[in-house]
Amino acid sequence: MQRLLLGASVAVLTAAALPASAQTQTASQTASVDDVIVTAQRRSESSQKVALALTVVSGETLDDRNIQTVNDLENTVPSLEVDSQLGGGQPQFRIRGVGLTDYAANNTSTVGIYVDEVAYPYGVMTQGLLYDIARIEVLRGPQGTLYGRNTTGGAVSVITNAPTDHVAAGLNLSYGSYDAAKMEAYVSGPVVDTLTARLSVAAESGGAWQYNRDTGESLGDKDTKAARLRLTWRPSAQTDVDLNLHYSRDESDGRGLRLITTPFTAGGGRVYPIDTDHRITGWGISPYFAQLIGASPNAKPFRDNEGKGVSLRLNQDLNWATLTAIASYETFDRNEFNDWDATASNEAGTFFFNDIDTSSQEVRLASPAGGRVQWLAGVYHANESVDGGFYSDFSEAKSLAFWMSTTYGQKVETTGVFGNVDYRLTDRLTLVGGLRYEDETRELNNFKTEVLAPTPSVRATTSKSQEMGEWTGKLGVEYTLSDDILTYANVSRGVKSGGFTTYNSGLPDQLEPFKFEELIAYETGLKSSFFQRKLQFNAAAFYYDYRDQQLQGILYTRTGRVGRMINVPKSHIQGAEIEAVWRPLPNLTVTQALAYKYGEYDEFFFVNATATEAARDKVTGEYNTIVYSDRAGERLPFPKWDYKGSIAYDWRMGDWGVEAQTNYAFRDEKFSTSANSIIDSFWLVNAGLTVRPMDGNYALGVYVNNLTDDYSEESRNRFISASTGSPNPPRTWGVRLSYRY
């Protein structure tokens, strides 16, 4: 791998040494790093003037690196990981080691996801296509003041392209390995003098890179469609109103799992060896389960998800302040079948069905920019509803042999008030203070776990409620050493809501709510530019004091084990990040990002899963001895190191412009609590080449993902008796065509 990256660097440096005639700029460029305007703090400002750890990914970068979903961002943004537990459509976001691992749909992430300032509080809602995007801003560290609860780890803010004042249109087409095809298109421009519009559509198909070990049947075809209409009305210079209507449908295959670490013995006695080809998977569905979920008797893992939403945003210049009001409604219907034993055996088939509805309203006032005192204040209200649950096929599990259902309804209501002040004491020194109070009521209604067949019985029923009224906030200081160097230090408090474990249950302890978590973050950082802004260098160091951290734990009984969300009394995380963007030549850009983080449990007495499994009765399979231990000092289960980088170079060859780019990422090993094993570290290297006529509106390109065809796993799990891993795709390639009018 090191040789490969060295070779890429040499190739770039060689290109940099080409004659001047070959280095003619393909576009209007300068040798300085571009100044990026962001809205991370609810006002427009340069990213280098924002005193927090922030990474911006432009829409152009998304296209160049073939980033199609929020999951792919982990290969570009330092300290960010996005895993889909058990290979399903429920992503797990983690920033700086702070994240929630939970396959249920009713609990919110510790990382807030926003699209055009509208929150997507439940992870499964974020799985739509990324298309027609202006930029993505990833904020690291608690963002409670401006973004509210459930941003303990940070926030990911997606900003879509706005309508243009002139007529514009574009088309992107791609085709690649395993018949993967994708289309994006947009048209934008004025409708009448005061009204502009932008219509964007996207669709993708194919890409089935996995296959069934028994039948050879393929798995992994995508079938997604999405559309967005943005209308902007400007009746005066002081007023603009933006309407955003959007729709998405995902009828893709699911992700298959792979048998790892130990062979699997099915209920009928068949032994499945450890899979040696990472493209191998397997699945099965019983006739009863197929009928129960309304699927074909030969169904493979699938998704049938639909999302719809509308938001309305008003910006009104009052001269003394800017008034912003946002109202939104989002709905998401989830239907998803997964096979968690990855074989034809029906030991762990799972079907999720959820109806999610969220509505929110926010009103805020912000002072004009440029004053010695800049302030922002607002109020926020949201209602959330999650109904549904999941069916489980344990019909061929040795100790179960039945079909189960878990259903529930959940309602959440929250109201928050917030304010933030930046006070410039001198031309160089600024004090920052922010405070937010949020009151939340969370209700779990009519929770029921029951055996459906062969002998119906009710295992558990309950209704629970939980309330939270907590402060979040930030105190900080900023000092400008020069026009190009900003230093800062701050302390902030973030909280994440408590919640309910909605797994299959027959144990009263499993049904007790888990508490909200609290994080006090201490951070210092530097943002700088050197050499006439050819080099941009940013760094940050942090220490987190973590209380009541939410963790996916295990409850053991004599006959088996079940999952439950628990709270760890006390833990800590510390780390640092550096990011650099270097443009030594107008047509050469190099980016580098390195992040380190390490965490430990400080107070935690819990089940020792390794010792408990070792003490299991070899004859009966029962857990007659459940071992508990003091786990203080144990490392938190996230990778220590991650490294991301890219090299892009463009030049002119006759009447054509050529751009070559490579990007690469390294993720360190991490421990999988659910699988009780280590997920190995891995490298990912991608590359692309694009050519375009100097006087034309189109471009042709080729790309390769996972250039070295290395095997890697997104996550590992053990559910019932099968040990499985969720593999990342092998090497894939494709061609692209784009057109702009």
Image (cartoon, grey):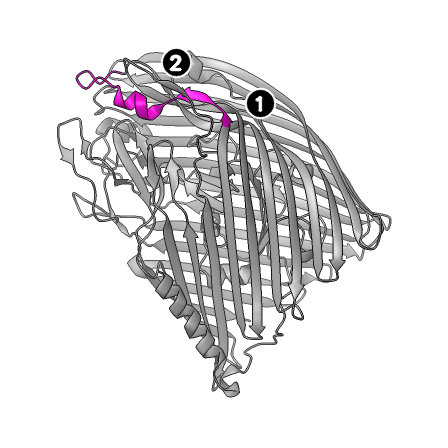
Which residue is at a point 42% across and 17% down the rendered structure image? 448
Q: Is residue 205 above or below residue 330?
A: below
Counting from the top left corner in percent of width and height, residue 600 is at 49, 33
Counting from the top left corner in percent of width and height, residue 649 is at 49, 73
Marked residue nearer the N-terminal end (2 or 1) = 1
Counting from the top left corner in percent of width and height, residue 626 is at 33, 16
**Res 77 seen here:** no
For the residue pair 512 and 430, the one nearer the viewer reads as 430
- Location of the N terminus by quadrant is bottom left
Q: Does residue 383 appear left or right of residue 635 in this picture?
A: right
Residue type pointed to by label 1: Arg
**Res 666 seen here:** yes
Residue designated by label 1: 442
State which region is magenta: 602-622
Q: Dividing the picture into quarters, in which one does residue 324 lie? A: top right
Q: Does residue 428 appear left or right of residue 615 in this picture?
A: right
Q: Which element type, helix, strand or loop, lies under badge 2?
A: loop
User: Could you give the CA–CA distance between mark 2 and mark 1, rounded to whole angstroms?
Assistant: 22 Å
For the residue pair 635 and 387, the one nearer the viewer reads as 635
For the residue pair 402 and 169, the one nearer the viewer reads as 402
Q: Is residue 585 above or below residue 460?
A: below
In the picture as drawn, the residue positioned furthest to the front comes out as: 633
Q: Does residue 636 appear left or right of residue 424 in this picture?
A: left
Near mark 1 (Cα within 10 A), the count class, few <14, some 14-19 or many ≥20, is: many
Near mark 2 (Cα within 10 A), the count class, few <14, some 14-19 or many ≥20, is: some
Residue designated by label 2: 507
Give the label, 2 or 1, closer to the camera. Answer: 2
Q: Which element type, helix, strand or loop, lies under badge 1?
A: strand
Magenta includes 469? no
Magenta includes 607? yes
Residue type pointed to by label 2: Leu
For the residue pair 562 and 337, the one nearer the viewer reads as 562
